[in-house]
Amino acid sequence: MKIVTLIARILLGLVSLVFGLNGFLNFLNMGPMPTGLAGQFMGALILSHYYWVVAALQIAGGLLLLVNRFVALALVLLGPVIVNILCYHVFLNQAGARSRSNDSLVHRLLRESPTLLRNICAADVTTN
């Protein structure tokens, strides 16, 4: 189990560090800006420089995970970033998540999540 924890910590640290550095250095091609609400959201993040705060949190969390110091703090820093990335792809930019997932379980979850959420909310309202 220690090996699995070590591998997960290093992989999450590397992913966070690379994509956090990409926020500042822009060395990975992110493709065209999405249209619609997703594009407006990304534009607001970039124009307000909030995107840099998120990138700095990713770098800090990634470095802490890679050096194996303050791992709990690193996870506290990265947790909200990961949740926001997932929410962005579920609610705002489903096409971007679908084009990369190639009909996998994640693709099906993202495709069906608004319907599932609507059904859960409707069921909750009718049972009360």
Image: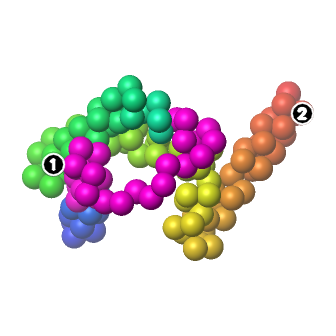
- The earlier-in-sequence mark between 2 and 1 is 1
Mark yes or no: residue 61 visible. no
Residue name at image x 66 percent, y 65 percent = 108
Front residue of 52 and 115: 52
Residue name at image x 29 percent, y 45 percent = 23
Q: Is residue 128 above or below residue 81?
A: above
Front residue of 92 and 69: 92
Dot 1 corresponds to which residue? 63
Helix or strand or loop: what does disc 2 sit on? Answer: helix
Q: Residues within 10 Å of mark 2 (few under 14, many from 20)?
A: few
Q: Residue 72, position in %: x, y?
A: 24, 41
Mark yes or no: residue 64 visible. yes
Range covered by the magenta-colored residues: 13-41
In the image, what residue type sits under mark 1? Leu
Residue name at image x 62 percent, y 58 percent = 95
Dot 2 corresponds to which residue? 126
